[in-house]
Image (cartoon, coloured by chain):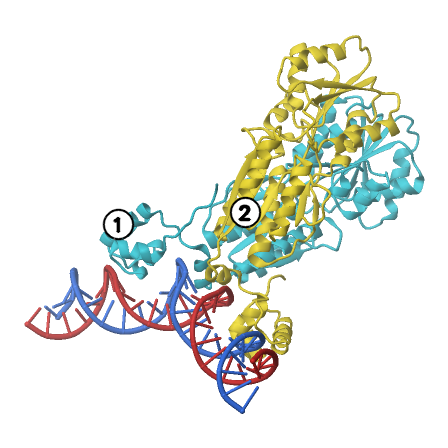
Chain colours: A cyan, B yellow, C red, D blue
Amino acid sequence: MVGKDNRVTINDVAKMAGVSKGTVDRVLHDRGEVSPKSREKVLKVIEELGYKPNFYASILASQKKHRIVCVIPEYVSGDFWSLTARGVEESAETSSRFGVTVEVVTYDQYDVESFRHVCNRVLADLPSGVVVAPMFRVETLNFVKKLDASGVPYVYIDSKLEDDSYFAYFGMPMFQSGYLCADIMADGRSLEKILVVRIERDKMGYSDPTVARRTGFMEYMAAHCPDTQIVNVFIDPKSPEDIRRKLDEAFAGASGNIGVVMFNSRIHIVAEYIRERRFQGVRVVGFDALEKNLDAIRSGHVHVLIAQHSDRQAAAAVNALVDNLIHGEPVHKKDNYTQMDILNRFNCDYYM
Amino acid sequence: MVGKDNRVTINDVAKMAGVSKGTVDRVLHDRGEVSPKSREKVLKVIEELGYKPNFYASILASQKKHRIVCVIPEYVSGDFWSLTARGVEESAETSSRFGVTVEVVTYDQYDVESFRHVCNRVLADLPSGVVVAPMFRVETLNFVKKLDASGVPYVYIDSKLEDDSYFAYFGMPMFQSGYLCADIMADGRSLEKILVVRIERDKMGYSDPTVARRTGFMEYMAAHCPDTQIVNVFIDPKSPEDIRRKLDEAFAGASGNIGVVMFNSRIHIVAEYIRERRFQGVRVVGFDALEKNLDAIRSGHVHVLIAQHSDRQAAAAVNALVDNLIHGEPVHKKDNYTQMDILNRFNCDYYM
DNA sequence: ACTTTTTCCGTGTACGGTCACGGGTTTTTC
DNA sequence: GAAAAACCCGTGACCGTACACGGAAAAAGT
């Protein structure tokens, strides 16, 4: 049996304490203008009666408006960040009931300047809370420092930086996901070599969340499969043709079993290549449940995806802020690592 | 940008439609006593203005009390049904804010009579909604028929029966989970035989949710590994010693690779056996993320678990009812299949 | 002792709904 | 055609809390 009848109201408390509800309200919200004596009295009565403020009446009466801003990379339908955006959208719906508006602002993840610009815009019109997916280390640290100075709580999603005053973090354990990936790739089969397909980026203080993943992968391989050759294949993000040439090179002259992996969400471009070249027996493992990646699983060109619910992550991030802003609830846990989901062709259709 | 200022109130609607808020309220709740003409008008205005009732005002004003009852098998801490109970407990917390109390009643899943008894108790004092985990086919059908007749919505969790008037269903796709299980067990390795450990039960119109799982498993094996021998090992649930003898028999004289699988949540008893006998190289696959099973993964005696978030399932079931009772929201989807999570030693620690 | 200031507190309205009540209209009934 | 019934609909009192406002009491100033 759960859920008791919570019939004690602020009026009961007031009556018992021999004061008016106004006074009770003042002590409840620490709004001052109450004598120590009556304050004491009220507190005692609250304790005795086990008074819990009615949540709904409270929200209804206080017409406070909160605004939360989510700063994430630009996205187009179907890519990784669109999942996050969807999650935000979802929780925005619920939050709007609490009088909280949620706003998404995006930046070009390949252009620091655009990130700086966005940060300034946010700082110029301070919201009540911020959710940020950090891509540029220095700039983000600078940004959150200012937020912190203004008392605006911020939540990291996807990856976090080394500062310590963030309100919460929601994301995948990146190192472990790489480790897991390696196990899935290599365990029980003796691979001759593994191609690690990487997208070249401008340097520019860029903080790639996937490096930890790669590190985890490499550590597993070093420990368990020292004989497997690891080959980095760098692709130019601007010329999609590039991948064909580079992979042709990498595949040339390979005789034994080969694996291909990417540590970002774009394994589907590898799947596409494999499909074109009609290669058989190549083991392909990637990350994130984009629609294109799921299709690649279904068609058999990708064997396993390691996925996370980025949408839930984003929603959780927003909700944590809302809970804090509205109910004054502290975070349950500061660091929240989402589960790593292993998807193959037999369970991917049940992954929404 | 998300979440607009939803400042349209029932009074705005009333004014626009040229009626009183009472009338608007009546059409909102389909409470009758409204002429078709004004009803039409109000509906149109609601549409135009995009009016959404304020949830909190609504809850505050209507002091309705709802009661939801969850009928599930008895459980002890750490077993499968305790997960479900935990999920119920969680959602009960949120629901209590909505003036909904959630009650868990349990029955002995090996005793029809106890189930009948529980059903009668529920029927004697009808709640607003029911969540039920069906174990006895005929009795459950009988039970829900009466609920249906009284207009009490009911939700199936874990497994569902073949009737059609349930409000919603939340559970794992059992057949596919068996198929998936077989793939994980056998793909890429040539197993000589697989032991299917089963717990004998009294017959008694008992509806075992795991039979579909076994069917899925067998179909996969027949299609992909016709040479692997499948051996059923029946265990007496009452004598835990039994398993040792039976498994000893089954293992005796096996030379090649062996797999062991159970289709309920108790693979940990096999793990325990393997640990005792110090067997090496036996592939063990099971279901459900019980603490004991997770421990078995960590110690290496179970290789993979296929899990579902039964807690979320239960919570979702309760929430669906609450949403419907409080806000009159219809279910999004009637049949909700939860994802199948593949757990191994590298990702099981992030599965909460 | 009489202002002036500060401190403390009660009152009343608003928030956006719900629902009982009762009065006015129309339709039925005899 | 009047009485009864059925049908519609507006009114207003809540629900439990937040907060502005103004006044009483106490402290400080002169």
Give residue B8's quadrant in the image: bottom right
Above or below: residue A250 compared with residue A60: above
Above or below: residue B156 compared with residue D9: above
Q: Nearer the viewer, residue A267 or B40?
A: B40
Mark nearest the camera among 1 and 2 is 2
Res. A40 mark = 1
Q: Specify whether B306 is left or right of A20.
A: right
Q: Secondary structure at mark 1?
A: helix
Above or below: residue B313 compared with residue D13: above
Point out residue A48 in the picture as x, y percentages from the top left corner: 31, 46
Q: Secondary structure at mark 2?
A: strand
Q: For the image shown, how many numbered marks are present on the structure?
A: 2
Give the residue drawn at x 62%, y 69%: B50
Q: Nearer the viewer, residue B342 or B288?
A: B288
Res. B68 mark = 2
Above or below: residue B286 compared with residue B85: above
Residue type, numbered disc 2: Ile
Residue type, numbered disc 1: Glu
Circles 1 and 2 on the same chain: no
Give residue B73's quadrant in the image: top right
Point out residue B202 in the picture as x, y percentages from the top left corner: 67, 25
